[in-house]
Structure formats: C-alpha cells, structure tokens
Amino acid sequence: MPMNNPNQNLVEVTGRRFRDVTPSAAAEAELRWFFNEAESEIDVPSNICAHLWGVSPTSADAVERRLEAQHAAGKINGWLKSLHTTQALLLAGVYIERPWSEAVTKALPFGLAGAAEAYPTARVEWLREVARGQTRARSVADWIEEVVRKGRTDLVNAWRTELELACALAVRAYDRARGNRPCVVPQDDAES
C-alpha cells in the first residue's frame, strides 16, 4: 500500500488524531521524546550506573549526547512555552506514557485519558465530587478510572467531545510554533 501522505502512516502507527487534526511526524516524535525520555538523556548518570553500563559519564560521546539532548529539549520547551498553558498541559497529558486500564483507554483513546487528567475542567469536577463526598479517589487519575468503571458515559462522552477539540487546537498550535523545521529529537532516539 503506497504512502504518499506521511501523516497517514502516523495515524496508522500511533492512532493519534483529534477531530481532523493529526500531529506531524516531527511533532509526534518530539512530544513523545520530550515528555518521556528527555530528562533521563540530559541527566548525568551516577557513577554506579556508568560503571554498570561500562561508560564514563564524562566521556566525550556521553557529554555530546547530553548536550544534544539539552539543545533539543530547550527547543521543544520553547515551542511549548509559546502555547497557552492549558494547551501545553494537554499535550503533556496526551504524551506522558502512563498505565491506564483497558476500559479507560477504550473510553478515552489516543491519549485523551491523560489529557482528561491534565484538563482543568476534569480537575474541578473531581474536586467538586471530593468536596461533596461523592468520591474517595485520591487523584484525578484514580477518579477517571472510577468514572469509567462506574459507567458514567455522560461524563466520559462530554470529556471526549471537549478534549478532542482542545487537543486538536493544542496539536495545531504546537505544529504552528515549531513550523516546518526538521525533527529535533537526537538521532539515536529517532532511529530506535
């Protein structure tokens, strides 16, 4: 099957599509890397970890890799800072990899569960239910799991409708901020 549109392949691989907006391949790679891997690639490993890996944390290659990661993370962070705070939080929610139950990922697919956790509306709704004694969930994530488990489809459907639009706007804003630049994820990570 020929792939003329690079975003078409991205949809098949990641499934991330919010209304009519699909993140560019570069945005997808950058946001996934930034929210899940950048910090560990920037940090200097402890001496014991370096010894176990058989690599000096101060070798020229290790220092160069950390500098490349710092540079890439700085660019991505700058683009995220140019967005509205809520948009940046939504993107973090969408891209931070975390375990959700199968029921939640089915009810809120494509990262929408994480976006719901970060979304101010869902946070306020959770606090309201905590204040009224309607939930004992200790976190928004636990509450989202509870809402789905209890079959509160009205609330889940409302979130999905709001979040699909909000995430579409956030993805579009990030793509606009980064422009048509090549992906800044360090090459070793982009290839793996």
Image: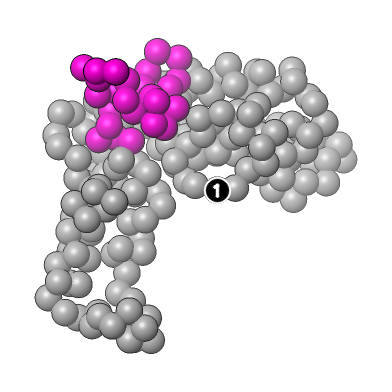
**Magenta stretch: residue 10 in it?**
yes
What amino acid is labelled 1 in the image?
Answer: Arg
Q: Nearer the viewer, residue 131 or 6?
A: 6
| Quarter of the rendering containing residue 95 | top left
Q: Is residue 98 left or right of residue 72?
A: right
Frontmost residue, 186 versus 86: 186
Residue 35 vs 131, above or below: the answer is below
Q: Is residue 136 left or right of residue 44?
A: right
Secondary structure beneath label 1:
loop
**Of residues 50 and 164, which is closer to you in this image?**
50
Residue 59 counted in the magenta span:
no
The correct choice, above or below, for 103 with respect to 35 in the image is above
> Which segment did they paint magenta?
1-28
How many callouts does the rendering have? 1
Report the residue at 22% width, 65% height from top: 66
Residue 52 location in percent, x, y? 36, 83
Crowding near the residue tagged with mark 1, few <14, some 14–19, many ≥20 C-alpha atoms within 10 Å: few
Q: Most extreme residue toward the right, as rendered?
A: 133
Q: Quadrant of residue 51?
A: bottom left
Q: Is residue 23 visible?
A: no
The image position of residue 144, as x and y in percent, is 70, 37
Q: Nearer the viewer, residue 105 or 95?
A: 105
Instruction: Give the residue displayed 30% in from the left and 40% down from the top.
Output: 29
Which percent across, then down, holds residue 68? 17, 59
Residue that numbered label 1 is attached to: 98
Q: Residue furthest top?
A: 20
User: Which residue occupies 30% across, 74% down?
Assistant: 44
